[in-house]
Image: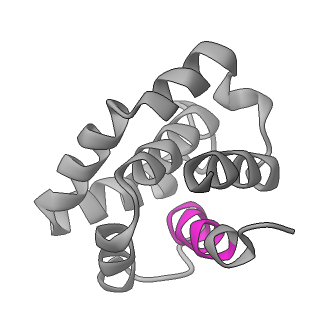
């Protein structure tokens, strides 16, 4: 499988925010090193998946707020990523809600790395 290392790293970031497997202090440096489009994609997928009313929304969205509060560069990186042409392509072609986590990570990493 292509881009295995990159997919593992992206999945680790997603897991850290979704399930709290890493602390904010551990997650912030990983997000700082990540591609801005990847940061935006992960935040967007989580926001769609854990919408208001979802039983885990407070924890998941709270972790996003936590990393953005811990480092203003993370929020800026997500805003920069939102303007990436790959994000525009994805959002014109797909719906975030149509992807489970593995399919989502596979698609976006392969697109970002190709």
Residue 10: x %, y % from top left: 58, 66
Q: Is residue 79 above or below residue 92?
A: below
Q: Quadrant of the N terminus?
A: bottom right
In the image, residue 14 lies in the stretch drawn in magenta:
yes
Residue at image location 39% in from the left, 77% down from the top: 30
Query: Colour mode?
Result: one colour
Task: Say whether residue 18 is left or right of residue 37.
Answer: right
Magenta stretch, main secondary structure, is helix
> Of all residues shown, which one is farthest toward the left?
72
> Of all residues shown, which one is farthest toward the front?
114
Residue 40: x %, y % from top left: 41, 44
Residue at image location 69% in from the left, 52% down from the top: 110
Task: Say whether residue 82 is left or right of residue 72.
Answer: right
Closer to us: 30 or 111 = 111
Closer to us: 100 or 58 = 100
Highlighted range, magenta? 8-18
Q: Is residue 20 above or below residue 42?
A: below
Closer to us: 9 or 62 = 9
Task: Say whether residue 53 is left or right of residue 66.
Answer: right
Residue 27: x %, y % from top left: 39, 77
Task: Say whether residue 77 is left or right of residue 44.
Answer: left
């Amino acid at each position: 499988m292509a881009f295995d290392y990159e997919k593992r790293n992206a999945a680790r970031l997603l897991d850290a925010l979704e399930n709290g497997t890493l602390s904010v202090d551990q997650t912030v440096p990983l997000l700082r090193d990540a591609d801005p489009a990847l940061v935006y994609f992960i935040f967007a997928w989580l926001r769609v998946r854990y919408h208001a009313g979802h039983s885990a929304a407070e924890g998941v969205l709270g972790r996003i707020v936590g990393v953005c509060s811990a480092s203003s560069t993370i929020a800026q990186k997500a805003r920069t990523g939102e303007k990436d042409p790959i994000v525009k392509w994805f959002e014109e072609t797909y719906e975030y809600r149509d992807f489970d986590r593995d399919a989502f990570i596979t698609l976006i990493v392969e697109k970002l790395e190709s």
